[in-house]
Image: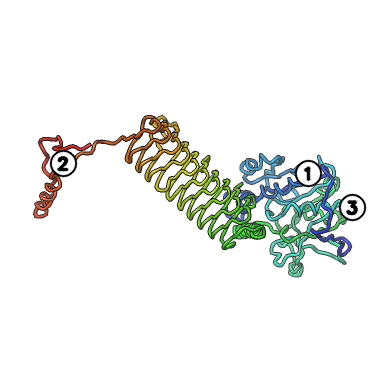
Amino acid sequence: MLKNGNTQKNNNNSEDRSVSPDRWTAIVLAAGKGTRMNSPLPKVLHPVAGRPMLVRVLEQLKRQPFAEIRVVTGFGYHLVEAVIGALGVVSYRQSEQKGTGHAVSVARPEQLDGDVLILNGDHPLIESEDIASIMSRFEKSHWDLAVVTAEVTHPGSLGRIVRHLGQIKAIVEAQDASAQTLQIKEVNTGIYCVKAQVLKELLPLISNQNTKGEYYLTEIVTLALEKGLKVGTLESHSRVAFGVNTQSELAQASQILFDQKARSLMDSGVLLLNPNSVYIEETVTIEPGTAIYPNVMIRGRTRIASFCSIEPNCFIVDSEIERGVHIKAGSYLERVKIMKEAQIGPYARLRPETVIGEQAQVGNFVEMKKVKFGSQSKANHLTYLGDAEVGIGVNIGCGTITCNYAVDRKKYKTVIGDHVFVGSDTQFVAPVTIGEHAVIGSGSTITKDVPPWALAVARAHQIHREDWAKKLVKNTSESDSSDGDKLPPKEKNTEPSKETR
């Protein structure tokens, strides 16, 4: 729908968003330092809901048929280029930040044909559907240049759209605007659609005659109008105008995305007891019927099946959790797989490459790393298992550890067969294999393989010294009346009077 003769309004419900494949090039401006962030990290790498804001913008762009995506880097370019290197984009470095107009020129627009979309890397709320709508409407408009605008309640430092009889006449930066101009609510989102040939012609004409002495891309609108080119505006959602310039705005952007994810999950049938206190990233998948308690953070490519229960204060990242799993309070899971109906925690830590079998139980203060833990096996208390394979129906007693890291700085594996019973306070000095149905006596240090069905006991001999405690009591009583502390006198015969094995 047209507004004021040269404004196209966004209509997400009915418009055809298809665009000509390979006709478009995107230029993403990501060179700024972000002074107001007060951070040594480049602004565009600050995380929004778990991912660098520039990465999120690029991921939304890559869902559209761009022939090429060019990113202009500058401050902290070595960090920025390292992060985006795997995303299939091309980097162009702005060695000195001289404004948005100069940044676009760094991206070598003279090489381009077709249509060009220019946008900022610090607008993390933009969605792929917003981009598709903007591109589609520009193609249908037959304009030479279009500015994407939005109506916002608090324009702040955003450039204002100045019109005359409905026709856009200029974009005025806030620092250069009069008091009257600052009352305008329609703002420049920082997104432009422009014919490549027009961009090549107008960029060299941009001047730096302003309070900052920078080359503003906004001047391209005035230049286009002066040359009689067709210039219009595309109205978009207010989220498109949301840019991050401060830590407060960064937190606000993250909360918006977390809230959106929470609403989406609840609409699909996931139970969130307090949606305001859970932090679930967009990439997480949770099936209906699962309950998420307060103060839970779920990150990365985590997938949670139906009828699971995630109790308070749990942290889960890049993990797969099958149907009916119960994760109790305070548990930490990283790159693990939990199979059906297993129970984890409370206060369990499961580290990468750990797989917990069906109906297994991993209890309080148990840590596992790179462990395959069999179905219906149990490790309920105060245990560390690392680099281990544990069979079906195994009982791991309290205080058991695998000694997997040796003095040669290498890690070795412990293999425990099906239905083994491990008594409390056992140490397995890897590499070692325990046969099925074996029993390990409590307090044992196992350094050799144990055959199936065997009883293995490896302890120091227990000794008794008769009446030793009486001597201790007598000596202590005598020392109470003297200045010094004394121990029982040393026995001449060091052999125990009685030994029990």
Mark 2 or 1: in front is: 2
Task: Name the spot of residue 266 as percent of width and height, x first.
Answer: 64, 60
Residue 465's label in the rendered image is 2
Q: Residues within 10 Å of mark 2 (few under 14, many from 20)?
A: few
Picture colour scheme: rainbow
What's the distance in space between the residues labelled 2 and 3, CA to CA? 101 Å
Q: Residue 175 is drawn in which quadrant? A: bottom right
Residue occupied by mark 1? 66
Task: Name the spot of residue 347 as percent of width and height, x first.
Answer: 45, 52
Task: Name the spot of residue 304 as percent of width and height, x first.
Answer: 59, 50
**Does any portion of residue 249 appear in the rendered image?**
no
Label 2: which secondary element? loop
Q: Disc 3 residue type? A: His
Residue occupied by mark 3? 142
| Front-most of residues 187 and 7 | 7
Query: Where, quadrant-wise, is the C terminus in this rendering?
Result: top left
Residue 91's label in the rendered image is none
Residue at 34 percent across and 42 percent down: it is 425
Q: Residues within 10 Å of mark 3 (few under 14, many from 20)?
A: few
